[in-house]
Image: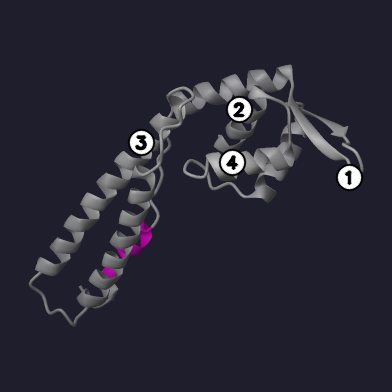
């Protein structure tokens, strides 16, 4: 399942919009939930239109160039409901970013591994602070739940990474040899 389709259909469910509005809303309001790029949003809109989930019309205001306006179709409403139920009920196994690198850390000297992991921990703590500083959404509970979920995962990752660094540092092998 492509959750980005769910995101676009969900935004269109509230109101018809042109592509720029969708991208602007995602960037300004959902940046903590999605890192979808503009080109991706347009490609998804095109794919949804081709499948009959979204209808495209053209609008022109004054001397501005015409723009495409997207509206969810009844078939798109059904697809949204299907994707939403699937997303809420299922859990995909995801390999966290960086886990492949962890598998091969034994090939570097211990001090280099811990320096890299400390840098990773610092970036993780910055991201966690950013999420923790975000204001409540104020419209329903969904966005706030998503944000709290991300915070819980980041805290867990922070705690795990801190312990992993300690475990590596306490390894009594030679610090200059690979771990």
Label 4: few (<14), some (14–19) or many (≥20) C-alpha neighbours in 10 Å:
many
Q: Which residue is mark 3?
A: 149
Magenta span main SS: helix
Separation of residues labelled 3 and 4 (CA atoms): 19 Å
Q: Which residue is mark 2?
A: 10
What residue is at 37 percent from the left and 60 percent from the top? 100
Quadrant location, the C terminus: bottom left
What span is colored magenta in the figure?
Answer: 98-105
Vertical placement of residue 111 versus 99, above or below:
below
Q: Is residue 175 left or right of residue 68?
A: left
Q: Which residue is mark 4?
A: 26
Separation of residues labelled 3 and 1 (CA atoms): 42 Å
Residue 116 in the image, given as x and y percentages of width and height: 30, 70
Separation of residues labelled 1 and 4 (CA atoms): 23 Å
Residue 2 appears in view: no
Q: Which residue is mark 1?
A: 65
- Find numbered disc 3 in the image and state the secondary structure of the residue it sits on: helix
Contact (Cβ within 8 Å) of mark 2 with mark 4: no
């Amino acid at each position: 399942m492509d959750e980005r389709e769910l995101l676009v259909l969900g935004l269109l469910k509230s109101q018809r919009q042109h592509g720029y509005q969708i991208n602007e809303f995602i960037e300004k309001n959902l940046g903590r939930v999605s890192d979808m790029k503009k080109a991706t949003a347009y490609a998804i809109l095109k794919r949804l239109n081709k499948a009959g989930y979204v209808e495209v019309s053209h609008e022109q205001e004054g001397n501005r160039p015409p723009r495409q306006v997207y509206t969810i179709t009844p078939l798109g409403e059904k697809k949204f409901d299907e994707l939403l139920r699937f997303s809420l009920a299922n859990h995909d196994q995801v390999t966290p970013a960086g886990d492949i690198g962890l598998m091969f850390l034994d090939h570097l000297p211990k001090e280099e591994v811990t320096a890299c992991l400390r840098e990773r921990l610092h970036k993780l703590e910055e991201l966690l602070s950013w999420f923790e500083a975000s204001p409540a959404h104020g419209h329903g509970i969904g966005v706030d739940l998503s944000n709290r979920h991300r915070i819980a995962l980041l805290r867990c990752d922070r705690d795990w990474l801190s312990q992993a660094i300690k475990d590596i540092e306490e390894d009594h092998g030679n610090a200059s040899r690979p771990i």
